[in-house]
Amino acid sequence: MLKKAGFLLLFFVVLVGCGTADQSEEEASQGNQGTGESTEEEEQMNEEESSNQELQSIIDQLSFKTGVTTENNQAVFNMALKNKSDQEIELSFSSGQQYEIIVTDPDNDEVVYKFSEDMMFTEAIENKTFDSNQTIEWEQTWDYQNGRKRVEAKEYNVKVELLPMAINQQNLDKTPFVKETSMEVPKSDEASTQATDEEVFRNIEVQGKNGQYTVTGEARVFEGVFHYTVEDGHFVYVEEQTVQTDGAPSWGEFEIEVNIDEEKLPANGVLSIVFYTYDAKSGKQAHHYQMTLDNFNN
């Protein structure tokens, strides 16, 4: 009887020991799994941090500068991006719009000029490659018009942004290329300014499609001379042409034939004709008037 009791006690001790060992192994296993998950998260965080540091290092090698020159009839905005590194850098843009310019009235924060407003841009991704020490420049003009009316002569705030979506195929959360400055719009020189845009060109009509267009209208310009080009915001399809009509103060009628080979037309975007004159004193372009010839986005 004592032998049987001793045997049962020994069996019970062994059984409890096995259970404890199994439990310890399970806990150890769970602990290892927990450690593995933590290591995986840490590795992912380290990779993201390393990627962000690499992107920031590239951004630090790009120098973005802007400037604005105010003339009697227009402001000229200049942008320049220089690759200061010893390697090639690629910028990717989500559309044909590569920059934005916003001019605001400091007295009421009203936007008096926004470059992208009423503009059409290609929707395809565009890439620009910068060689080592290469500088790429952009230029944009504004004729001081806000709703066909010249803005008041005073100081305005200017914000200029370059709009890449990625650098070397690494996506950007927001653009790092932003500059803010101010500009002084001068008083209009009445002696050399003929009139506002809507008083210079009127009744403009376009007929035709696929590269063959007839443009008619009226112009009231000094000595009856004005000029035009045809472009899509990126490329010029018809270089500067001169038109002669009746001189101011009369309204001179005109008819223009625009012919562009169909295979040279843009695959998408908006084709426009831009009318303008030259200021008698400064020799600069003035009185810009833009009219759509064809919309290839439809």
Image: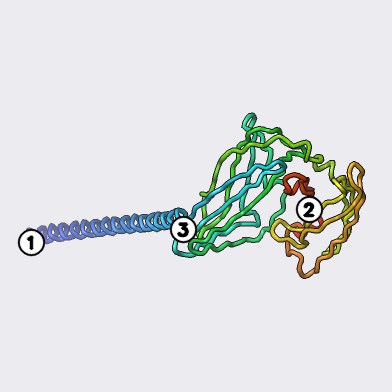
Question: Where is residue 184 shown, x and y percent of the image?
Answer: 63, 36
Along the line of sight, the residue nearer the viewer: 202 or 175: 202
What residue is at 75 percent from the left and 58 percent from the top? 231
Question: Where is residue 283 shown, x and y percent of the image?
Answer: 74, 48
Q: Amino acid at mark 2?
A: Val
What residue is at 21 percent from the left and 56 percent from the top? 20
Residue 258 visible in the displayed image? yes
Question: Where is residue 280 shown, x and y percent of the image?
Answer: 77, 45
Q: Based on the displayed image, in which of its 4 quarters is residue 111 positioned?
A: top right
Q: Which residue is mark 3?
A: 84
Along the line of sight, the residue nearer the viewer: 235 or 173: 235
Q: Amino acid at mark 3?
A: Lys
Left or right: residue 207 versus residue 94 is right
CB contact under 8 Å: marks 3 and 2:
no
Seen as rendered, the residue at the extreme front is 281
Q: Which residue is mark 2?
A: 274
Q: Label 3, label 2: how many angstroms apart (C-alpha)?
A: 37 Å
Residue 116: assigned label:
none
Above or below, comparing residue 232 to residue 176 in the picture: below
Residue 3: assigned label:
1
Q: Based on the displayed image, in which of its 4 quarters is residue 265 positioned?
A: bottom right
Seen as rendered, the residue at the extreme top is 107
Q: Earlier in the sequence, mark 3 or mark 2?
A: 3
Count of residue discs: 3
Question: Where is residue 17 shown, x and y percent of the image?
Answer: 18, 58
